[in-house]
Image: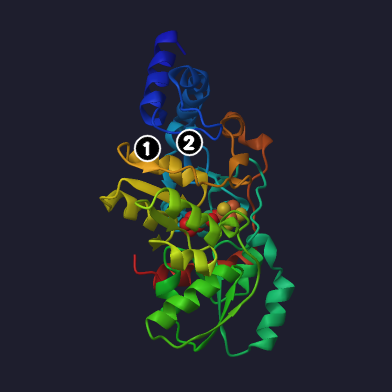
């Protein structure tokens, strides 16, 4: 690559990344973009040669999102893009359950996760055996699993949801009794949402919490409100119920983006992962985002260097695989979601 092309690539990166605050509090300077340019330009070139698609969750590093990704989105958006993909290779920058979902919805493709494994406190919070035991305990319940679960757990559930469609799908459930797993806080938020709408369901929660969103407390909201009374506070439904109820808006990652993009407010406190704040900063250069973001360390395991390795030689890196029988069953719950979601 000539110096001139590298300079052009650095300028392109700087145009997209210059507004964004890095985790160390610094902005993406032109000098920093010049360091990234050799990597991103090689990746973008090889991606075309190898017929690969890079799908990236909003929580990954901005240089991946804006430097090399073809599709960026939340869990729901990316699962649909993965299902529609025609490329031979899908590189999923996210965590393991997301790459596994991409393989489930488009099994003939070679799917890679750059860090090979990246956990999620929710997906790891429940075992298939625990789901089987719950099935025995609640034989009449509909089992609804959050997409943040393993393929084995999805295979034991009736329908899968993401934060983008959970409220609609649970509200439309044919069952009065629902076992919702593995996000206990989301289950409590659904219960409160349904109650407010006058919908009568018994929600039995199982599993754990998101180790990023569960850290936000009412105290954080009090502090923000005292210092920035005009700030709009927005959060993800993986947060505690009292945090969701005290916020101005609670919604999925894509819903939060839409809320901010359409809002006339000038200051926002986003109680979610830091990556979405970077995207918001990029899309809303005149709005101020308070430094409220927390980091999902597992999402940050995705690195440009590993994406490049996959593209250089995909036989040197393990593909994402799912056992055939598990895959067939898990796909049923994902397809039920695609059928039941409003969009
Ligand atoms: P969404 O991408 O569905 O908003 O979920 C957030 C999250 O925590 C993903 O792991
Ligand atoms: Fe899992 Fe939370 Fe990280 Fe999302 S942010 S991957 S739910 S630990």
Q: Residues within 10 Å of mark 2 (few under 14, many from 20)?
A: many
> Disc 1 or disc 2, which is closer to the eye?
1
Which quadrant is the C terminus positioned in? bottom left
Tell me whether circle 1 and circle 2 mark residues in contact (CB < 8 Å).
yes
Q: Is residue 3 above or below residue 305?
A: above
Front residue of 248/294: it is 248
Image coordinates for residue 324, horizontal then vertical, percent: 64, 63
The residue shown at (52%, 32%) is 25
The residue shown at (49%, 32%) is 63
Front residue of 221/29: it is 221
Front residue of 239/338: it is 239
Label for residue 182?
none
Q: Is mark 2 within 8 Å of ligand 2?
A: no
Looking at the image, which residue sits at the far right? 129
Q: Which residue is mark 2?
A: 62
Which secondary structure lies at badge 1?
helix
- Count all numbered tags in the image, as a single digit: 2
**Chain-order first, disc 1 or disc 2:** 2
Image coordinates for residue 317, horizontal then vertical, percent: 67, 38
Which secondary structure lies at badge 2?
helix
Q: Which residue is mark 1?
A: 282
């Amino acid at each position: 690559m000539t110096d001139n092309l590298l300079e052009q690539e650095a300028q392109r990166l700087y145009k997209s990344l210059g507004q964004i605050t890095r985790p160390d509090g610094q902005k993406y300077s032109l000098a920093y973009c010049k360091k990234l340019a050799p990597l991103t330009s090689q990746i973008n070139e090889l991606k075309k040669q190898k017929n690969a698609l890079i799908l990236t969750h909003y929580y990954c590093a901005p240089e991946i999102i804006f430097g090399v990704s073809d599709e960026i989105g939340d869990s729901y958006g990316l699962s649909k893009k993965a299902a529609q993909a025609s490329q031979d290779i899908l590189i999923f920058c996210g965590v393991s359950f997301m790459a596994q979902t991409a393989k489930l919805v488009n099994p003939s493709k070679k799917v890679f996760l750059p860090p090979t494994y990246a956990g999620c406190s929710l997906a790891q919070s429940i075992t298939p055996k625990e789901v089987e035991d719950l099935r025995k305990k609640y034989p009449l319940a509909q089992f609804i699993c959050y997409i943040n679960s393993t393929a084995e757990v999805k295979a034991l559930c009736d329908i899968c949801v993401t934060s983008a469609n959970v409220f609609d799908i649970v509200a439309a459930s044919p069952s009065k009794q629902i076992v919702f797993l593995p996000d206990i806080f989301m289950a409590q938020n659904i219960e409160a949402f349904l109650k407010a709408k006058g919908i009568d369901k018994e929600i039995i929660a199982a599993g754990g919490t998101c180790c990023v969103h569960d850290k936000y407390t009412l105290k954080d909201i009090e502090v923000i409100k005292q210092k920035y009374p005009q700030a709009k506070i927005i959060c993800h439904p993986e947060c505690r119920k009292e945090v969701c109820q005290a916020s101005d808006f609670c919604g999925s990652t894509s819903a939060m983006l839409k809320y901010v993009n359409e809002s006339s407010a000038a200051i926002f406190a986003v109680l979610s992962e830091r990556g979405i704040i970077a995207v918001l900063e990029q899309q809303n250069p005149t709005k101020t985002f308070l430094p409220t973001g927390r980091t999902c360390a597992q999402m940050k395991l995705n690195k440009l260097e590993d994406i490049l390795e996959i593209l250089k030689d995909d036989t040197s890196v393990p593909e994402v695989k799912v056992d055939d029988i598990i895959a067939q069953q898990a796909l049923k719950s994902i397809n039920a979601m695609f059928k039941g979601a409003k969009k």
